Each structure stands twice: as structure tokens, then as C-alpha cells.
């Protein structure tokens, strides 16, 4: 398949990156160009490539030997595997340029002179010296709600008279539709990693554009410091709504990291039913079973059938750990529940007739956790009984919640484990 020497940068996003022997290395996530204060033709510096390990690295454009319709091929496996860090003067095409407002003065497009336009894409082209340069800019009129997208126009970069400068890219209220489209289908942890690579301005614009549920999911994958920073950037009412959409234990962890007055102000703005769960969790020390637990495990009454129980654990909002076991109690089944009777493991449910009642297949002998038990005790409990989720019960035998193994790991690992660098890999280890 013939290589091309002219391509639109945004179309590279998601393309497979191959090594010289045809092995898959990762995917293109962005294109890095240089834009200086002095007006000169922007150069393409390289690609941001996401490896199979999710680490994002920088690959110089001169390492690219071919750009084909289905893949980008490198001419060598000898590339730095250090995590990508944007340097002064470097600009991300998808992260910063696309959806920037510009003005053009193209003699072939007189109707667009002096009109605010939005960048859709940048055309890049390889010169005779093998350098890649920005040669074209695709633009359209700003899209308004309830209207169809306007036509796309292509102009030479030299006719862009306003916008494609460091100061122009720093202006507020830049669109993020294409960035959001790029995140479609990605797991929250992958989106969180991608947000870290964006400049602060763009990061906040993307965060502001997420719907509340999506933001809650992504927020749970950020470090405590990043979470508090995001929360402080949101208006109080929206911050409270996002906290309501979070798992109660994660919301409690986040509020516990804030100043007590700030946490209380947010709790008062939350729905009382949601804030009650969070307040209960905040009453326990963070490194105890009570502080680690979620207040929303799967809780069933004794008369629940196996079919109904399986329907409950199929809930896509449940983590695999929480869905691995259902707890059976006397009414009420909302925490704190009535008298705790025992639990039913998912594997047992799969082996029983659909019409059978969970009361007949209870594991009533499994020891329980108490809210004051330490993190070390909880860890030993999971190791001793080979569990990924365990019940937390008070002295009156009411189920208060459940601790899952992912919550334990979150507290065992260093506070900054989400941002820690993986050990440096050799080129052979990283690219094969």
C-alpha cells in the first residue's frame, strides 16, 4: 500500500503504529507541532503514541517512515519510552488547536474575511527536506445548537491572520466536541490518563463539558490532589451533583480530603438521601473497614429468587468485586439493614435453579468485618478467606456495607500510585 506525504492530522488519531518488522506498538493519540510567537510556518515535531501499556510517549516525526491509510510505520524501534511531557513551544493538534477560533483572509474565500471560524483540522505535508509542515487549515463557521453543521473550507496556513498563535490558543471557551468524541468508548481510567496530558486550560474545558455521570466516573480515577483541584474549579451546585453521582465511598474519600467547612457546604447542597450515606461513611476513620466500605452493596431479602438475584448482580454500574456476592438480610434492605443472615456467592447462584430462594443457599458461616477493624485486619481477612468483597456488620448484626478488594488496594498503594512512572523499559521490552 502506497505511503502518503500529505495527510490531515486529526485523521491520524487512533491509527495503529507499527514497528519496522510490522509489530503493533500502540495507537496515535495526537500530533505535536511547533507554534512560535514569531509568525512562521508551523513544523510537525512528532506523534503522541499510546503504547499497549497505556503509557503515552513522544515519537519524533523523523522516526516515521510511512503513513498509510491504515497504519503509521516507524523506521526503527529505537525510541524513548519516557512518558510524554509537553514542552514550551509544543502544541497538540487535537488537544489544543482543533476547535480554536480563527480568522482568515483568503482571496479565494472573500465571504469568510473577518468572520469568526473554527478550526476543524490541520493539513500536514512532507517537504523535500523530509520535514513535515502545516500547510492547510480546515475551518467552518461555528456550529449553533439546533442547526446543521456548516460547510468545511480549506485555506493555506498563511491566510490565517488570527488565532493560530500561543496567545490565541490561550483564549477561553474553546470547543471540545472532537476531544469528547475521541474519548467515546474509553474506560474512565484511560480518560483520566489522557486528561493529565492536556494543558490545564484544555483539561478544565473538557471536564466542564462532561455530563455529571461521566465526570463522576473519571473523577474516581484521579489522584486525591487532582480530585480536589477539579472540585474547586466547579460551581458548588455542580460539584454537589457530581458527588451524588459518585460511589458513596469515593465521595466520602474526596470530601474527607477537603477542609471541614468546604465539605459541609457540599454535603448541604447534596440530595439528603445521598448525603446521609456519605455522612455515615465519614463518621468512620479512613483506614478502617467502616471507612473503606461502600454503603451500596447488593442486598437481598430472604424471599428473593435466584433469578432475581442474578438480575441484580448484572447491574453494569456494579464493579466486578461488589457483584461477586449478594448479602441477605431481614427488611429493610437499605443500609443499615435489618438483621444480617448471610451471603450468597455469585458462583453458587449460577449453579442453582432460577426459582430457588436465596434463603436456602446462604453461606451463614462466613465471618464478618466490624467497622472499627483496621486496614491490616481487613487485608488479612481477604487473604484468609480468598474473597474480593466482604460484609461489614455492627454490634446489633445490621449490615452497614461491604468492603471490596479494590478499595483495600487503593489504601495500600501510595497516595500518588495513579501518577507514578512505571519502571523504565528497554526498547525491546516496550515495543514487542
Image (cartoon, rainbow, N blue to C red):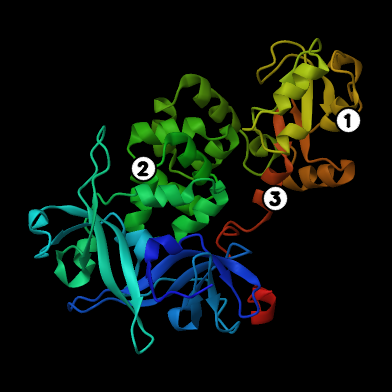
Q: Are marks 2 and 3 in contact (CB under 8 Å)?
A: no
- Could you give the CA–CA distance between mark 2 and mark 1, rounded to whole angstroms? 46 Å
Q: Nearer the viewer, mark 2 or mark 3?
A: 2
Quarter of the image for residue 428 reads bottom right
Identify which residue is drawn at 81% across, 12% down: 302
Where's residue 226, x and y in %? 46, 53
Quadrant where the N terminus is found in the figure: bottom right
- Could you give the CA–CA distance between mark 2 and mark 3, rounded to whole angstroms? 31 Å
Q: Is residue 358 left or right of residue 177?
A: right
Residue 366's disc number: 1
Residue 409's disc number: 3
In depth, the one of 343 and 132 nearer the eye is: 132
The answer to whether residue 24 is visible is yes
In depth, the one of 31 and 38 nearer the eye is: 31
Where's residue 329, x and y in %? 77, 16
Q: Is residue 375 left or right of residue 235?
A: right
Amino acid at each position: 500500500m502506497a505511503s502518503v506525504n500529505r495527510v490531515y492530522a486529526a485523521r491520524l488519531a487512533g491509527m495503529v503504529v507499527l514497528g519496522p518488522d510490522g509489530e503493533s506498538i500502540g495507537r496515535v493519540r495526537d500530533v505535536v507541532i511547533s507554534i512560535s510567537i514569531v509568525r512562521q510556518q508551523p513544523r510537525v515535531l512528532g506523534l503522541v503514541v499510546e503504547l499497549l501499556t497505556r503509557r503515552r510517549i513522544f515519537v519524533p516525526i523523523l522516526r516515521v517512515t510511512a503513513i498509510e491509510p491504515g497504519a503509521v510505520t516507524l523506521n526503527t524501534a529505537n525510541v524513548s519510552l519516557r512518558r510524554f511531557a509537553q514542552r514550551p513551544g509544543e502544541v497538540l493538534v487535537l488537544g489544543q488547536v482543533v476547535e480554536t477560533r480563527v480568522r482568515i483572509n483568503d482571496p479565494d474565500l472573500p465571504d469568510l474575511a473577518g468572520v469568526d471560524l473554527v478550526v476543524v483540522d490541520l493539513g500536514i505535508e512532507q517537504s523535500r527536506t523530509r520535514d513535515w509542515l502545516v500547510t492547510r487549515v480546515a475551518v467552518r463557521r461555528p456550529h449553533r445548537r439546533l442547526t446543521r453543521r456548516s460547510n468545511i473550507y480549506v485555506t493555506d496556513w498563511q491566510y490565517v491572520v488570527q488565532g493560530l498563535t500561543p496567545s490565541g490558543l490561550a483564549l477561553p471557551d474553546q470547543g471540545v466536541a472532537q476531544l469528547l468524541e475521541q474519548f467515546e468508548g474509553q474506560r474512565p481510567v484511560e480518560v483520566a490518563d489522557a486528561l493529565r496530558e492536556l494543558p490545564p486550560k484544555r483539561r478544565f474545558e473538557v471536564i466542564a463539558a462532561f455530563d455529571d455521570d461521566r465526570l463522576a466516573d473519571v473523577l474516581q480515577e484521579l489522584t486525591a490532589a487532582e480530585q480536589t483541584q477539579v472540585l474547586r474549579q466547579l460551581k458548588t451546585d455542580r460539584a454537589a451533583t457530581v458527588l451524588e453521582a459518585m460511589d458513596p465511598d469515593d465521595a466520602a474519600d474526596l470530601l474527607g480530603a477537603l477542609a471541614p467547612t468546604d465539605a459541609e457546604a457540599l454535603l448541604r447542597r447534596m440530595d439528603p438521601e445521598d448525603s446521609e450515606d456519605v455522612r455515615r461513611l465519614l463518621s468512620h476513620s479512613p483506614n478502617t473497614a467502616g471507612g473503606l466500605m461502600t454503603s451500596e452493596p447488593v442486598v437481598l431479602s430472604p424471599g428473593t429468587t435466584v433469578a432475581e438475584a442474578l438480575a441484580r448482580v448484572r447491574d453494569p454500574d456494579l464493579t466486578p468485586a461488589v457483584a461477586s456476592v449478594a448479602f441477605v438480610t431481614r427488611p429493610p434492605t437499605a443500609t443499615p439493614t435489618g438483621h444480617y443472615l448471610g451471603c450468597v456467592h455469585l458462583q453458587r447462584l449460577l449453579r442453582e435453579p432460577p426459582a430457588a430462594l436465596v434463603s436456602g443457599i446462604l453461606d451463614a458461616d462466613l465471618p464478618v468485618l466490624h467497622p472499627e477493624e483496621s486496614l491490616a485486619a481487613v487485608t488479612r481477612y481477604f487473604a484468609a478467606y480468598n474473597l474480593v468483597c466482604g460484609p461489614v456488620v455492627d454490634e446489633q448484626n445490621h449490615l452497614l456495607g461491604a468492603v471490596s478488594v479494590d478499595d483495600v488496594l487503593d489504601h495500600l498503594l501510595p497516595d500518588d500510585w495513579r501518577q507514578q512512572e512505571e519502571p523504565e523499559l528497554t526498547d525491546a521490552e516496550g515495543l514487542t
